[in-house]
Image (cartoon, rainbow, N blue to C red):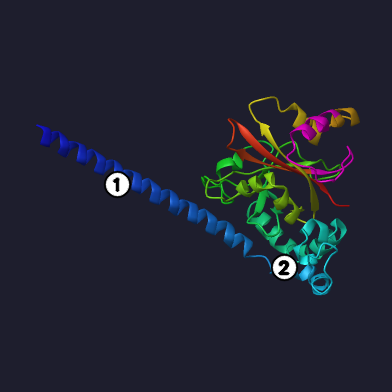
Amino acid sequence: MKKRVLNILMVIFAVIFVVSGGFLIRNLTEYRRQETAFEELSSLFPETETLTAIIQAAQESQTENPTETGESEADVPLKDRISPEEWKAWWEAEAEGRFPVYQSLAGQNPDMVGWVRIEGTGMDYPVCQTPDDPEYYLHRNMNHENSSYGTPFLDANCTLEDPRSSLLIYGHHMRNGQMFAGLQNYTSVSYYEQHPYIQFDTLTEAGSYEIVMALRLDAGGTQVPWQQLLFPADESEFQAAWAIAEQKKFYETGVEVNADDELLALVTCEYTQANGRLMVIAKRIR
């Protein structure tokens, strides 16, 4: 009897192992398929100059002229090496070659409204918007197929036409580090200092943004402060929401904002708390 029970248990465990292995292989295959799809989209763009290219002249002189602390300027964070105005000028030149690709992709999927990118990271994705069905792309790819990765999407309240609103973009925090998972790195001030700028281009206009703050939110609570921060009815509403955000930020960036600035907020899940969200807020460089 004992031997029979043991054999039955072994069969059960074997079935569980095979089924679990099958699910794991299926998930890994699906993840890789979706990663490849986004990589193929990114490969459509002409190669951009690297960060090294835009600071090459500075680096050549800086390595010969160390700072007062004895460090070469190459060791200084990117935030302190390239001004927002220099970054904006570089990206606008680079983006000229990207607009035909944006427009071609939008021709295939009219829901595509732009592209979000953070130089030097894996974040490099199309952004869609469906005002009549706001979370349509939560679990769909650019081909309208079911996808655990989804596609980054713009909040239904956002407008890209004049008068343009501030922007709120959602993306998944994938456990394998894909999609908006990299935003978690912005809990570190040193990471922020090396990646202080975000690009969000529409189909016809380049947009450069400098990061203002990163903060952790509880999605289970009221969302009123964040709606009022990005879509304030007046100056006082903005200031009240900003005061709350200031209390939740991870560190000081020194970037100042006011109610007239166009803000860009990237949001993803945050797993250190129930219903957690991580938000990175940036303002447009004018």
> Where is 205 relative to 263, above or below?
below
Q: Position of residue 2 (x, y in %)?
A: 12, 33
Residue 124: quarter of image = bottom right
Q: Which mark is residue 238?
A: none
Q: Position of residue 242 (x, y in %)?
A: 82, 33
Q: Verify whether residue 255 appears in magenta.
A: yes
Farthest residue toward the top?
222
The answer to whether residue 209 shows anywhere in this view is yes
> Where is 69 relative to 128, above or below?
below
Which region of the structure is painted magenta?
A: 240-263
- The amino acid type of the residue labelled 1 equals Val
Q: Quadrant of the N terminus?
A: top left
Farthest residue toward the left?
1
Q: Position of residue 41 (x, y in %)?
A: 61, 60
Callout 2–callout 1 Cβ contact below 8 Å: no
Q: Which residue is mark 2?
A: 50
Q: Residues within 10 Å of mark 2 (few under 14, many from 20)?
A: few
* Closer-to-camera residue (209/71): 71
* Closer-to-camera residue (184/159): 184
> Where is 67 relative to 152, above or below?
below
For the residues labelled 2 and 1, the Cα–Cα distance comes to 46 Å
Q: Which residue is painted at 72% across and 52% down in the image? A: 190
Q: Which residue is painted at 20% across and 41% down in the image? A: 10
Q: Which residue is mark 1?
A: 18
N-terminal label among 2 and 1: 1
- The amino acid type of the residue labelled 2 equals Thr
